[in-house]
Amino acid sequence: MQTDLAAVGSRLVDGMNLEDSRPTTLLEGDGVEEVLSSISTVKIEPHPPGTISRAVICNPVGKTIDAPYVIHDEAGLILLHLCQEKPEYLSSIARNLSKKGGSVRDASLVISRSFQDEECLDQSVGIIIQDIGIEGSFRIRISSDRGDEAPSDLSFQYFALAQGGLTEHHLGGRYLPQEIGLSEFVKLQNGCYPGQEIHARLDSRNPVTKRLVRIRCEEELEKKRLITEDGKLKIFTPFVDFFAHAIADEGVVDGVINHKGIDVEITTIHSAF
């Protein structure tokens, strides 16, 4: 079940320094927190430089487009996007910031992002996002020094998947934030953001019961949907080192189930990074 891409990812992880090549954006100008909050499910408050926040951006039907880390900087807000391509919602932010003399800049070429193992801490300069991954054993380093990190290509996605991270399979308007470990960032009191009406309706009438789980199975599964006595699981990512992500019904419990003679281990991911 381990693909060549997964093997490449594992070798890069062994180096403890893996470049994240997804886009990075700098928001400049007055009121950048207010502008970003207007499209985010959680309000972004003004904070001192070096503070780390998190935004979740949804489409009008409430499904997740992006969930960037937000770095508060003297120059503005730095968005570490989790989507693979430059997101379209930046054009809306640019229009709103331009009214206040602000701007949106592509910072991908001047800001380096890399994954590192917490056990291999060093004195390298930069901003550190700690306690990343299922076991909280990884960190993200943000620096203006490009360094000598190994390029990620697709291998970063597989590395992130194995550790509980969000990839293009989770984003792009495919799932509600509550379904992919982002429930803690849905704040209905934040005002009228894209998808807020849908989230409010679900909260009051039909709460979201599906959840993100990590499954481990040492044999190839024939189908991407498992039906158990307690409910269904929809596998929606590739298997990497025997792991994949799935969306599980409320009744499906954590633990090991036997599916047609194959043991499948299920673990809920309470907060995806």
Image (spheres, grey):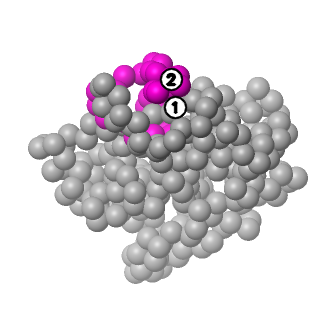
Tell me where the magenta segment starts and ends, as one range. 245-273
Q: Residue at x 78, y 43 (%)?
A: 7
Which class describes the residues within 10 Å of circle 2: few (<14), some (14-19), or many (20+)?
few
Whole-number angstrom distance, CA of label 1 to CA of label 2? 16 Å
Q: Which residue is mark 1?
A: 215
Q: How many circles with numbers are drawn on the protein?
A: 2
As drawn, the residue found furthest toward the front would be 260
As drawn, the residue found furthest toward the left would be 205
The answer to which of 170 and 107 lies nearer the viewer is 170
Query: Residue 166: within the magenta?
Result: no
Can residue 100 be seen by looking at this rendering? no
Looking at the picture, which amino acid does disc 1 mark? Answer: Ile
Looking at the picture, which amino acid does disc 2 mark? Answer: Gly
Marker disc for residue 258: none
Looking at the rendered structure, the secondary structure element under dot 2 is loop
The answer to which of 200 and 101 lies nearer the viewer is 200
Q: Between label 1 and label 2, give the one nearer the viewer.
A: 2
Q: Residue at x 20, y 40 (%)?
A: 207
Q: Which residue is mark 2?
A: 261
Say left or right for 188 vs 218: left
In the image, residue 83 sits, relative to residue 94, either above or below, namely above
**Considering the image in quadrants, where does the N terminus appear?**
top right
Where residue 236 appears, x then y in whole percent? 48, 48
